[in-house]
């Protein structure tokens, strides 16, 4: 099947979509774009020659605009807050450039002297090192996100700088490991410095919305490399878990709890029409577009009562189509 973009009344071929059989896998130009019963809007192309074509076919009704608002760095902010990394939390709250702060530590130079490329490296580390990745993955992240090639030893030094600068985040990974032991042993525990996420024996990690992150049949085993590891059952298959991965699971779940409550606030005035990860889109009449945009930004900067001190921020876009946003 060939998809088209109707742009300026001209049909422009976007890509060929091929059904790859089981589990509704659809591939476009060799890239998986859809693997579920619903549409995966996060996989619509945003880069390259075909960037935005499909997104611009998602239109607001006549006389309306679409407003798409994205929660800024919500996982990194949630991670710093849960870990009790107060200096990073304060930097987020004060709207400081945390990417430049990180880069200044890496390059050992003042924040005001950090250039665009160095800032991108700092951004890659802030967003990529929070869940315990090592030098090998950081090298891949830097190449893909920042276009920077570094040697293994350089990557190791960068990772260590991140961990030394924000030492309470690695401490949270260790607490995640401890909580796995508690859960496996049928003992209660507390995951984070905010006393928010509780380990409930035989159930899992209790979230603010009353749901649980569960690791069924959790066991301590010998991993493929001979090292001790945690294994649990997911969809009938064995999966492995460790402290840093627990932190990732919890941060993403807490971030989603926040966005869910923000969405309910938005829905009091404007019905959300789609959501992708940490972004929410609405439709508003043209004559109240600015008012609606301000309201959505206000809602997505609001924090729930159970998250005092969590620094939240957002960015929004507006247009006649999803792509214009």
Image (tube, rainbow, N blue to C red):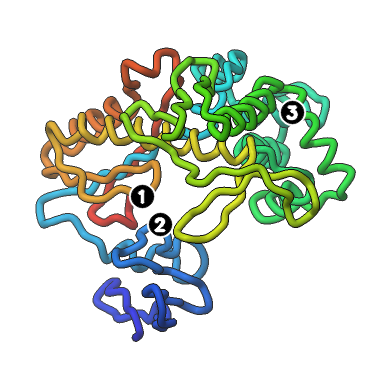
Q: What residue is disc 2 on?
A: 42
Which of the marked residues, 1 or 3, is nearer the chain's N terminus?
3
Which of the marked residues, 2 or 1, is nearer the chain's N terminus?
2
Image position of 222 with respect to 106: above or below: below
Q: How many marks?
A: 3
Q: What residue is disc 3 on?
A: 163
Binning the other alpha carbons within 10 Å of mark 3 as few (below 14), some (14 to 19) or many (20 upward) gives: some
The label nearer to you, 1 versus 3, is: 3
Residue at x-position 79% and y-position 29%: 161
Residue 116 can be seen in this image:
no
Image position of 171 with respect to 50: above or below: above
Question: Does residue 212 appear to the left or right of 199 in the view shown?
Answer: left
Question: Does residue 132 appear to the left or right of 208 in the view shown?
Answer: right
Displayed quadrant of residue 160: top right
Displayed quadrant of residue 107: top right
Image x and y of residue 118, in percent: 72, 38
């Amino acid at each position: 099947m060939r998809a088209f973009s109707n742009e300026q009344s001209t049909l422009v071929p976007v890509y060929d979509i091929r059904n790859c059989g089981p589990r509704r896998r659809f591939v476009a130009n060799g890239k998986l774009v859809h693997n579920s019963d619903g549409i995966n809007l996060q996989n619509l192309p945003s880069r390259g020659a075909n960037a935005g074509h499909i997104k611009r076919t998602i239109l607001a009704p006549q006389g309306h605009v679409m407003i798409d608002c994205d929660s800024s760095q919500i996982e990194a902010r949630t991670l710093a807050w849960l870990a009790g990394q107060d200096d990073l939390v304060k930097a987020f709250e004060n709207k400081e450039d945390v990417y430049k702060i990180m880069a200044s530590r890496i390059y050992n130079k003042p924040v005001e002297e950090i250039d665009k490329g160095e800032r991108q490296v700092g951004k890659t580390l802030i967003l990529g090192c929070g869940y315990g990745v090592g030098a090998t993955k950081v090298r891949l992240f830097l190449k893909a996100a920042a276009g920077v090639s570094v040697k293994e030893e350089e990557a190791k030094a960068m990772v260590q700088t991140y961990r030394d600068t924000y030492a309470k985040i690695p401490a949270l990974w260790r607490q995640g490991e401890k909580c796995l032991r508690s859960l496996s042993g049928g003992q209660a525990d507390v995951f984070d410095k905010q006393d928010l996420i509780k380990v409930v024996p035989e159930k899992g990690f209790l979230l603010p919305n009353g749901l649980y992150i569960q690791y069924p049949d959790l066991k301590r085993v010998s991993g493929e490399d001979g090292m001790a590891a945690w294994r649990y059952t997911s969809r009938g298959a064995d999966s492995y878990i460790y402290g840093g991965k627990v932190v990732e699971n919890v941060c993403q779940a807490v971030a989603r709890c926040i966005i869910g409550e923000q969405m309910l606030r938005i829905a009091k005035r404007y019905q959300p029409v789609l959501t992708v990860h940490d972004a929410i889109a609405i439709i508003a009449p043209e004559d109240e577009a600015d008012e609606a945009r301000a309201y959505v930004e206000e809602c997505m900067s609001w924090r729930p009562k159970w998250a005092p001190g969590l620094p939240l921020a957002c960015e929004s876009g507006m247009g006649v189509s999803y792509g214009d946003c």
